[in-house]
Image (cartoon, rainbow, N blue to C red):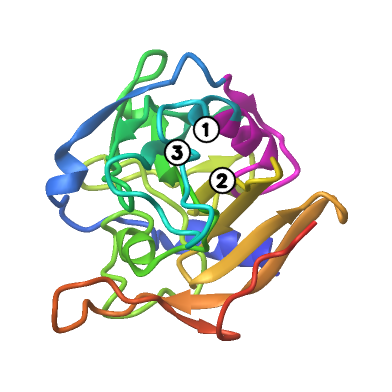
Amino acid sequence: MRHALALLLLAAGCATPSAPSTAARRVAKGPWPEVPAVEMPTGDTSIPISLLRDVADALLERPGAKVCDPVTQRPIMGLSTEYCSTIYVAGDRDSLSWRVTEPSQGTHNSCRPSFAVEDDDHPASRVWVVGYIHNHVCGAPPSSLDLAAWPTDAFDAYVAMAEVRLIPGNGQPGNPAPAAYKNTGIELASAIVAERQDGTRVYLRYFPTGEVQQWSNARAGWVTLGSCAPRQLDSRNRARPPQCSPEPLQLLRE
């Protein structure tokens, strides 16, 4: 069914992005030399676990990327640090690879991804931004800020969540080409990597529908945890937890 939806979107051209936002105009450089490209096919139409593992190996070694208060299980201002890398695919229908950009440094609880990429090996017409990946220092699920940024500026998450998983266009004026490997559309998604105090790692990815998945080593596959939508800031301009079903969203413990 997922592949059928992807092909339907390819035919209908539903991935045309809206006018670029301020974030979209910031250009990230790729690929990140510390993370090797993952060549198609990967057995998945969205962010593959092999890419997330490679990103985690590099990203979680950055200063502050794993710093978490052991008592409160919350980030520590001034010490904990989130980093964002843009996830994209580059190439053509017969030779496509998953890549990430150099990470940008954020604060203890947020970072700003770029939704435009300049790749060293491919022109803009052969680059498709899929979403972004960042670390959560305390291994928390996606926040309202994460979901609101998700995954590009193609739609406003506060207005309506997409009913199907979207396929990215490459941003070409007038007629953006959809991202596809052979006859399979590439689905938009963003991701989170984290390391718990016991050294185990958490890999999450989330879709335009709000669906949140976690990689299970025990099952050797992705497990759907539920669906979440962002909440508006409270009266004091503070972020509120997303609205999830089931509530609260529970991560796997393996």
In primary-sequence order, the first of circles 2 and 3 is 3
Q: In this view, does 168 lie to the left or right of 165?
A: left
In primary-sequence order, the first of circles 1 and 2 is 1
- Percent from the top left, x then y, of residue 36? 58, 19
Nearer-the-camera pick, 180 or 133: 133
Image marks 1 and 2: residues in contact by CB distance under 8 Å? yes
Nearer-the-camera pick, 175 or 85: 85
Disc 3 marks which residue?
87
Please tell me whether mark 1 sits on a helix, a strand or a loop. Answer: loop
Could you tell me how far apart the alpha carbons at marks 2 and 3 are, in whole angstroms?
17 Å
Figure quadrant of the N terminus: bottom right
Nearer-the-camera pick, 170 or 246: 246
Could you tell me how far apart the alpha carbons at marks 1 and 3 are, in whole angstroms?
16 Å
Which residue type does callout 1 highlight?
Leu
Residue located at (30% from left, 43% from top): 113
Question: Is 15 covered by the magenta stretch?
Answer: no
Disc 2 marks which residue?
194
Which residue type does callout 3 highlight?
Ile
Question: Is 53 covered by the magenta stretch?
Answer: yes
Residue 54's place in the image compared with 107, above or below, is above
Q: Which region shows up in magenta? A: 36-56
Residue located at (50% from left, 54% from top): 189
Q: Which mark is residue 60?
A: 1
| Label 3 crowd (10 A; few <14 / some 14-19 / many >=20) | many
Image marks 2 and 3: residues in contact by CB distance under 8 Å? no
